[in-house]
Every structure is written in structure tokens, then in C-alpha cells.
């Protein structure tokens, strides 16, 4: 399916170029069309398989373990200093 | 020292003792009774991220209570994290670890699996990263 699409576009581009200078814009547009068609055509060939395992989102990815240990004392003081919000 | 001077000194000392007792209690407000009640009856609980959560479907008053306290907590975490060169999330997470540890039997807390659990007499289930 994809190779057919590609050659169709290229043939169109060549035809447009042969028409001459007055159709320069059309020819350029057609060439662009052909250029754009390449990744589109190739893109259709890429197969994406869904993973078998469930996707787990790690929400606390930015938590540094060493920082957690350093904060332990301060968070205990924080409870004593602000008993109304804890 | 005369008897009168002794009495004055005694009264002064008593007054100072009363003041020192009165200052911390007035400066550090305790839990609001509605907040204390909601904790005790398990309609709210401590989450792993350092914030309070509403357990199941609760009245608007409970939801507001939680939202208000969480705003205050976030402001507190933001300020303290800055002083400790930590991120707000790191500070809040560490606070959550300690708050879950300090829940008393009957109170709700969030387990690492994300479910609400009622604190029993034993140690709570906590994230392995907790200090």
C-alpha cells in the first residue's frame, strides 16, 4: 500500500516540473507534497505494540532518599511547632 | 529579707510560672475540635504525600476542613522546604511518613498501595523510602 502511494506522489511531482516556469509554484508545491509524503508513507510502516504490563506511573520520582533522611528531624520539630495543622 | 518582701517575691515567681505556662498554649493553638473529631471517627486520614485526604463520601464541611488544612500544610511545607534546601514534595513526603507513624489506633492512613487503612496497635504500613 505504501510504495504505491509514494510513487503516485513522485510521478505527480515530475509531471508538474515538466510544465515549465509559469507553473513553478505548482511544481514546487507538488515537490513539497512528495517530500512530505515520504515520512507519512514511512510513518505508516512503523508498528507500535502496546506493552503487556500495566503502565505504572511513579509519582514520587523526584524524591531523593538522602534528603528524606536529612529532613526527618525537621519534620518532627514542625509537628511540635504547628500542632494545629497536623 | 522581711516577711512582706518574701511574699512579694513568691507572688512574682508564681506569676512568672503562670505566664510561662500560658504563653505556649496561647501561641500554639491545638487541633480544631471538628478536625480532631474527623480524625478520630475516620472520615479523614493521613495520606502518603503529607496531606490530609477525605475517606469515602463525606459532607461538604469535612471536605472544606481538609482543603483548608491542606492549604495551610502546603504553605508550611513550602516555607520549611526552602530552609532545608529540599523540594516541597520531598518535605511533604517526609512529613507524611512521620504523620502516618504518629497516627493513633482508629485513625485512617494511606498505605503504599494507595488504600485507606485503619491504624491498629502495631506499626503502620509505610513507604520503604520513609526515614
Image (tube, coloured by chain):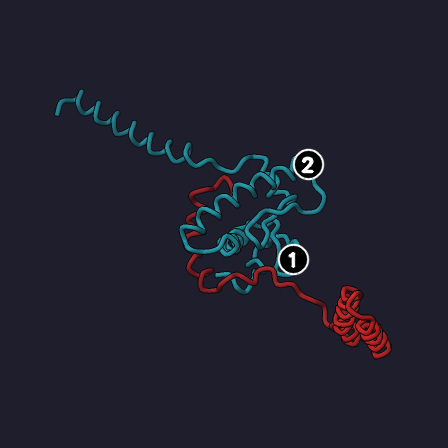
Chain colours: A red, B cyan
Q: Position of residue B46 (x, y in %)?
A: 58, 49
Q: How many badges with numbers are in the image?
A: 2
Q: Position of residue B37 (x, y in %)?
A: 60, 38
Residue extending farthest top: B4
Q: Which residue is mark 1?
A: B114
Q: Residue at x 62, y 47 (%)?
A: B53
Question: Is any atom of residue B48 visible in this view?
Answer: yes
Q: Residues within 10 Å of mark 2 (few under 14, many from 20)?
A: few
Secondary element under disc 1, as helix, strand or loop, is loop
Secondary element under disc 2, as helix, strand or loop, is helix
**Disc 2: host chain:** B
Q: Earlier in the sequence, mark 2 or mark 1?
A: 2
**Disc 1: host chain:** B
Q: CA distance from mark 2 to mark 1?
A: 23 Å
Mark sitting on residue B35: none
Up/down of A38 relative to A72, above or below: below
The quadrant where residue B66 appears = top right
Q: Position of residue B12 (x, y in %)?
A: 25, 26
Specify whether A17 is left or right of B78. right
Question: Is any atom of residue A50 visible in this view?
Answer: no
Q: Do marks 2 and 1 share a chain? A: yes
Q: Residues within 10 Å of mark 1 (few under 14, many from 20)?
A: few
Q: Position of residue A31 (x, y in %)?
A: 76, 70
Q: Residue at x 60, y 60 (%)?
A: A59
Q: Residue at x 13, y 22 (%)?
A: B2
Mark sitting on residue B60: 2
Could you tell me which quadrant the N terminus of chain B lies in? top left
Amino acid at each position: 500500500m505504501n510504495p504505491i502511494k509514494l510513487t503516485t506522489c513522485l510521478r505527480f511531482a515530475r509531471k508538474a516540473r515538466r510544465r515549465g516556469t509559469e507553473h513553478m509554484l505548482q511544481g514546487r508545491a507538488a515537490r513539497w507534497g512528495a517530500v512530505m509524503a515520504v515520512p507519512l508513507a514511512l510513518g505508516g510502516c512503523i508498528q507500535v505494540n502496546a506493552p503487556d504490563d500495566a503502565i505504572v506511573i511513579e509519582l514520587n520520582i523526584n524524591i531523593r532518599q538522602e534528603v528524606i533522611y536529612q529532613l526527618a528531624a525537621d519534620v518532627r520539630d514542625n509537628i511540635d511547632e504547628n500542632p494545629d495543622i497536623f | 529579707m522581711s516577711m512582706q518582701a518574701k511574699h512579694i517575691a513568691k507572688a512574682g515567681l508564681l506569676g512568672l510560672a503562670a505566664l510561662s505556662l500560658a504563653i505556649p498554649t496561647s501561641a500554639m493553638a491545638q487541633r480544631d475540635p471538628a478536625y480532631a473529631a474527623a480524625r478520630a471517627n475516620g472520615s479523614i486520614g493521613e495520606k502518603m504525600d503529607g496531606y490530609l485526604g477525605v475517606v469515602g463520601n463525606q459532607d461538604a464541611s469535612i471536605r472544606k476542613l481538609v482543603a483548608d488544612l491542606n492549604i495551610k500544610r502546603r504553605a508550611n511545607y513550602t516555607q520549611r522546604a526552602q530552609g532545608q534546601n529540599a523540594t516541597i514534595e520531598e518535605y511533604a513526603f517526609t512529613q507524611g511518613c512521620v504523620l502516618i507513624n504518629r497516627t493513633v489506633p482508629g485513625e485512617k492512613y494511606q498505605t503504599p498501595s494507595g488504600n485507606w487503612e485503619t491504624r491498629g496497635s502495631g506499626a503502620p504500613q509505610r513507604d520503604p523510602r520513609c526515614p
